Image (cartoon, rainbow, N blue to C red):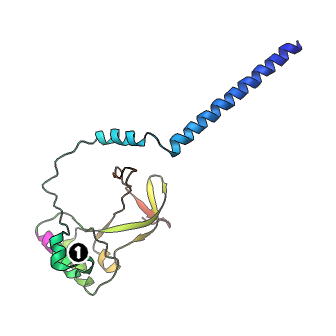
Amino acid sequence: MKTKIAAHSRRQRRMLIHTAIVFAVGSIFALIFAFLQPFSSINWRFTDQLFVPTEVSPNVVVVSIDDESLAKYGRWAEWPRSLHAQAIENLSQAKARVIGMDILFCDTSAEDAVLAQAIEEAGNVVLPVVGSQPLPLEDSTQVYESFLLPNPALRQGAALGHANLAPDGDGVVRRLPLVTKDASGST
């Protein structure tokens, strides 16, 4: 009877040890996959295959600051706000549905009133908001420590849109948060 109990407990100990080893090995593999993500590049390639390139709409026009403009007007940071106002007026007269400015006008200028009036009259200008120091995601909402905003005179007549991009490890942007907040909870 004693040998039967001893054999039974030996079997239980062995089973417990084997279970602990399997659990430890499984935990190690789970941690490796969670932190190192060894198959992320394969996953990104498969994800990219789901998106078929399409023709760019002829209705979308990108007005960019090119080398010719830089040669004519100098460094773009030193351009007068009246030049940006003229661009907005020209786009508005050309019946642009939305005018998205990719310039963050944080500082103030003597010509802010001219630019603010052009933004107000167009009624369809979107100015960027840039979050600084990203914090962990909250329910798919990106939270930033603070935001860089356009100066108050300009943002009164404009819509605001966040301009932060978070590329994947291979440098491709595959997702954007729809909502961003600052640390105090303001969107």
Identify which residue is drawn at 76% across, 25% down.
13
Task: Give the main secondary structure, helix, strand or loop, of the magenta stretch.
Answer: helix
| Residue 18 vertical position relative to residue 83 in the rendered view, above or below | above
Q: Which residue is mark 1?
A: 119
Name the residue at the right extreme. 2
Task: Tell me the crowding category of disc 1: few under 14, some 14 to 19, or many 20 or more residues within 10 angstroms, Cα based.
Answer: many
Residue 31 in the image, given as x and y percentages of width and height:
56, 42
Q: Nearer the viewer, residue 69 or 136?
A: 69
For the C terminus, the image quarter is bottom left
Q: Is residue 186 above or below residue 1?
A: below
* Horizontal arrangement in the rendering, residue 132 relative to residue 111 (left or right): right
The reply, left or right, for residue 71 in relation to residue 172 is left
Q: Is residue 102 magenta?
A: no
What residue appears at the point 56 percent right and 37 percent down from the top-left corner? 29
The answer to which of 154 and 58 lies nearer the viewer is 58
Identify the element where label 1 is drawn.
Answer: helix
Q: Residue furthest left?
A: 94
User: Magenta region: which residues?
Assistant: 89-93
Measuring from the top left, give residue 100's x and y in whole percent: 24, 66
